[in-house]
Image (tube, rainbow, N blue to C red):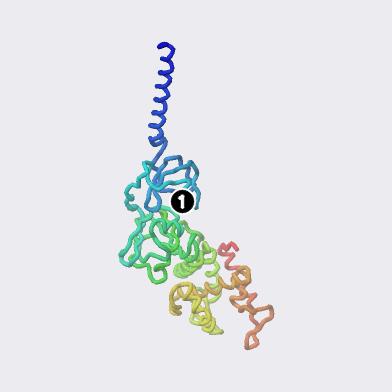
Amino acid sequence: MTNKRFPFKRLSLLVILAVFLFTFCAALPSVNAAARGAWAPNTAYAVNDTVTYSGSTYTCLQAHTSLVGWEPSNVPALWQKGGSDGTTPPTPPPTTNGVTFYADINYGGKAVTLGIGNYTLSQLNANGIPNDWMSSLKVPSGWTVEVYENDNFGGTKWTFTSDSSWVGNTINDKMSSVKIYTGSPSPIVTKPAEVPSHIWTYVMNADNAYGKGGDFALLLSAVIKKESSFGAGLPGSPSAGDGLMQVEPNTRNAYLSQFSSKFGRAYNHSSEQDQVYLGALILNEKITKFGNIYNGLLHYNGGDNWYPGATDSYGRPILADQYADAVYATYKGYGGKN
């Protein structure tokens, strides 16, 4: 009888050992688990991988490839807050190698440092930066920062390649998305040889304000050439317009509130930059309203109600078509794309 029962005892011991080993191994973290650093979209994560997000550590519950919108705090089915042992480790120290943004002027108040990358508003929020924030910033040598007025890199863009202890009224507390990279941006378009450098600066600033990628700067240069010969034709035109873009006083006054809303300050007619900003505002409006650049030029010169054969209050023909032909030809000669 003893010999018959011995195999059963041996089998029981083996079962007990197997259960013990299964339980013990299950308690151990996966050998494939890894600390993956900051969470990022379009990244493959394995079970028990750990990431940091918004100041906390999360552990992966299901293997997956991340997508925008699947941030760890948004998908509890994929991520568990805390390390793989179920505890929350200390908050990692802030990034030190990057661009530092400050709440106040002169590098004062709350400071947040961001590394290379593109940051939408939700990503800025995740890093502790609220909407419409930032009064000064420090930029490492060789880095470039593009600050955008709106989320998803829309609206006016301001570019920084060095420290700024005060970003100015136009930019202050306007940041809603950011791009950070090393090196300087490649020229979007080439400055036409005949356009003076200071005029080119004005038109590129206006182009950035509307996010046109350089093409609008070419068009504005063509308009300024026609209107004032790049400033040589100042102080005024027969219709009482003056400035680089020869905008008449009544028209200027009609757009003052729009100018303030767009640029965050009152229009200063003694500023050539503001002259270009105002002309750009009007021209952009006409292009949007009338469907394309050529039609926009027609109505920038002739007014919203212009039609072939229209005359002014003195009975003189309004030759907006000739104006548009000349400016558009110059613009295309500069390399205009539209």
On the question of residue 184 being in view, the answer is: no
Residue reaching furthest to the bottom: 314
On the question of residue 337 being in view, the answer is: yes
Quarter of the view holding residue 331: bottom right
Residue 68 to residue 206: above or below: above
Q: Residue at x 50, y 53 (%)?
A: 69
Residue ID for mark 1: 71
Q: Closer to the camera, 158 or 316?
A: 158
Q: Residue at x 41, y 68 (%)?
A: 171
In the picture, the quarter occupied by the C terminus is bottom right
What amino acid is found at the position of numbered circle 1 in the picture? Glu
Q: Position of residue 88 (x, y in %)?
A: 35, 47
Q: Residue at x 48, y 82 (%)?
A: 235
Residue 135 to residue 99: above or below: below
Q: Closer to the camera, 10 or 54?
A: 10
In the picture, the quarter occupied by the N terminus is top left
Q: Residue at x 36, y 61 (%)?
A: 101
Q: Position of residue 143 (x, y in %)?
A: 38, 55
Q: Closer to the camera, 47 or 193?
A: 47
Residue 321 to residue 177: above or below: below
Q: Position of residue 108 (x, y in %)?
A: 30, 65
In the image, taking residue 134 as reference, residue 42 lies left or right, namely: right
Q: Position of residue 148 (x, y in %)?
A: 45, 63
Kind of element beneath mark 1? loop
